[in-house]
Image: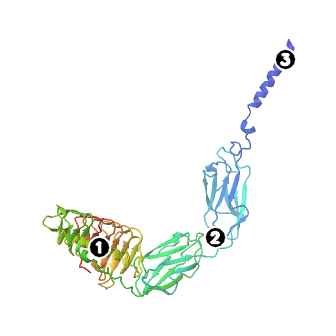
Amino acid sequence: MRKLKVSNIWISAFLAAALVAGCGDSDKNANAGNPGDPLTPPTVTSVTPAAGSTLVCPTPVVITATFSKAMNPATIDTTTFTLTAGGTSVPGSVTYAAATNTATFTVSASLAPTTTFTATITTGAKDTFGNSLAANFTWTFTTPAPCPPPTVTSVTPPNASTLVCPNTAVITATFSHTMNPATINTTTFTLAGSGGASVAGTVSYNVATRIATFTPSATLASSATFTATITTGVQDTSGIAMAPPNFVWTFTTSPPCPPPPPPSAGLGAACTYGVLAGSTVTNTGATTVRGDLGLSPGSSVVGFLDTNTYVGTGTHTAGPGVVTGTIHITDPPPPSTTSAAAAQAALSVAYLDLQGRTAPAPTTVAGDLGGLTLAPGIYKSTSTLGITGTVTLDGGGNANAVWIFQIATGLTTLGSSNVVLAGGAQAHNIFWQVGSSATLGTNSTFNGSILTGSGSISIATGATLNGRALAQTAGAVTLDTNMVNVPPCP
């Protein structure tokens, strides 16, 4: 009986020991080799630059270390991530990206060329569980020999060249290196005219092509020599400046371009019309049209005084508008050379003539004409065109100078914008051929005849039109307290 009790005691002790052993630290036993394990020390899994590498000019130095697990950002700093050269510390700053487990050392100044640097991650770097690296992690890399300075490899216009009409100077410089865009500006890329007078313009830089472009704010003077300069203030992305001296080239603009002729048949029967539409004409407010107003094939005009002179079979709804000429609403037969229908036929001919002009060679324009001064000629936009502020049309002393604007889609001027005439320019020699619709902004002043293809013309409150609003058969014209002054026929 006593022997059985002893045996039971030993069996119980054995089972207790086995249970204690089985309840030991599962992390320490089963998962001790898992990098994400709380007790596994972090390691550095990759670095840049690669260990033992020699950089190639002008590769920028990006010094990083990626860890095997999430690190405690408070332990990743300039005391645990260091850079030295010959035992001398290199100043810089350290950041840590938790999303990628990557620490980055950013040097405070450019590294010396042809020098071996040692980067170190110390055991002071800890993961989020408080585990340190098992040992310091070090690697080395060598910087390249001094990089050659950037140069200008090509320019437009070519040096010492003479442009041909229409003097559309595209002033560019192409660099041998990728440049720092912040150093490419109107201080480091300049244009000067005769006598060294600065030419106003804007400067842009295309990183992909390494091309800097100077765009003059106004058309360059004819028969003049210009000097373009790239200064030594430009730098590449490694901070290396172009070596002295400044890069300079010249080009000469052509003699004055012959202006385009007006529409071959003029505006014909549409010439006396200040407003012509195909679907409707609607006015709100005290509008005055100093000329004729016409509608064909539509039949309803709204917003003009009963005391105006009306002809045609259409109807009108009275309003405050005044027309000093005649209001034609679907003129009855027999056909008349002054009817709205005749005016629409003439408008179609003039529109197609203006749309098809190719000589002199059109100047491409885009976006916004605001702030520009334009010489006589043909200006072509492949999309919409806008006017913010003031655009000046300068005839250069030629009262017969002609401007033709070929606009593929819409024309929009903003409120209080202005089309200003200078140098003898005349409103009756300015033609805006618009593919779709045109809108003149509130209190704006516009010069020239607007001819739309498929869209309408809207003239906002208080706007003044020194010209004509001519919309073809699908278009409407909307007015609101406007002054429409019809210029003499060309």
Q: Nearer the viewer, mark 1 or mark 3?
A: 1
**In the displayed structure image, the side of residue 427 where residue 367 appears, left or right:** right
- The percent coordinates of residue 152 (x first, y second) are 57, 78
| Residue 113 picture quarter | bottom right
C-alpha separation, residue under disc 2 versus residue under disc 3: 84 Å
From this view, report whether residue 378 is shown above or below residue 481.
below
- Name the residue tied to disc 3: 6
Residue 202 seen in the current view: yes
Q: Residue at x 77, y 25 (%)?
A: 16
Residue that sits furthest to the left in the current view: 307
First in sequence, mark 2 or 3: give its number. 3
- Name the residue tied to disc 1: 347
Q: Residue at x 65, y 63 (%)?
A: 90
Q: Secondary structure at mark 3?
A: helix
- Front-most of residues 110 and 250: 250
Looking at the rendered image, the quarter that the N terminus falls into is top right
Residue type for callout 2: Pro
Q: Secondary structure at mark 2?
A: loop
**Neighbour class for label 1 at 10 Å: few (<14), some, many (≥20)?**
many
First in sequence, mark 1 or 3: give its number. 3
- The percent coordinates of residue 212 (x first, y second) are 51, 74
